[in-house]
Image (spheres, rainbow, N blue to C red):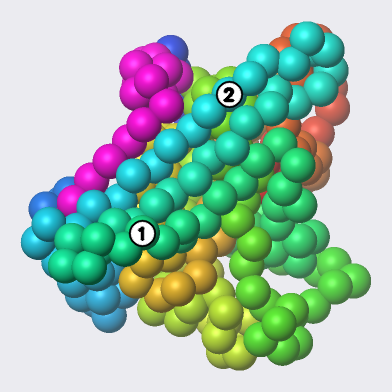
Amino acid sequence: MDRMSFVPGANARKQMEDCNGLIFFGRQGAVDFSDEFIFPSGQNILYQTVAAALSEGDKVDITFKLKENEDEDLEDEGTTKAIFTDQTTGRKKVLWEVSNTSEGLREVQIERAYNAYRNALSTHLGVPPPLPLQGSETMTSEAESRTLISRALSPSNILQVSGASWYFVELSAVPTSSPEYPSASATLTRPMRAFDALILTSMITLAFGSPPLVFAIRPGKGRFGKMPQSFERLKFQPKHVDEKENEGPDAFLYG
């Protein structure tokens, strides 16, 4: 977690821009990503399941189209979509999609993301984990626990905030649609670029049939590498933000 004191930087945003609206990968890409991002976590069942999710010749295309909104206070229009193609049958399946009109994560999932982030950051800082944020909403059933796809993956966000925010994907062998998910501990990837989060999210969705918890975190101005005591949820990043040093929330969470 040594990246937590820094932002991804301009190269991360350029990486997304250079994709020209398309990312694709096959079986070998899935194996490579599993080796890089899942295996080090010790989540062996997840690692084996995700690494085997694609057969030779199968492909996943991640497309994102963006139409700029003339009103700078409104989110740009567009849709990000992950599509799986079965080489044997030729059939295509939409794994997930998110747009500027999508609902995004529920508040209970946002709280889970925030608590998991602070736990990971406490390990990085070498301090005891803080008390978890307890909201009024709880996950109590399969229907309630189902994770919606994160607004952090909308076209506007993956392009506009990719240089200033780290992305995190939850790693769990318990699918988010399972009744056991609410009681499962949250283990996060190391801080990732938006590019990597898009691919890993698609791989886990393909393997388990429901998307993992994924979100992006941007520290408030002057708060890099510090434990946040407050956060603000953002569905999108306005084009122009006037932030003052040490004013406002400690972190901004996109989901």
Q: Is residue 20 magenta?
A: yes
| Element type at mark 1 | strand
Quarter of the figure that contains the N terminus: top left
Residue for point 70% across, 23% down: 76
Neighbor class of circle 1 (other Cα within 10 Å; few <14, some 14-19, many 20+) is few
Looking at the rendered structure, the kind of residue marked 1 is Lys
Label 2, residues with CA under 10 Å away: few <14, some 14-19, many ≥20 = some
Q: Is residue 103 left or right of residue 188?
A: right
**Residue under numbered circle 1:** 92
Q: Nearer the viewer, residue 145 or 81?
A: 81
Dot 1 or dot 2: first in sequence order is 2
Task: State which quadrant residue 173 falls in.
Answer: bottom left
Q: Is residue 41 visible?
A: no
106 to the left or right of 214? right
Which of the 4 image quadrants contains residue 11? top left
Residue 61 forms part of the magenta stretch? no
Most foreground residue, 152 or 251: 152
Task: Give the magenta-colored segment's residue range.
Answer: 11-27
Amino acid on which disc 2 is placed: Leu
Residue beneath label 2, please?
Answer: 66
Depicted 10 relative to depicted 234: above or below: above
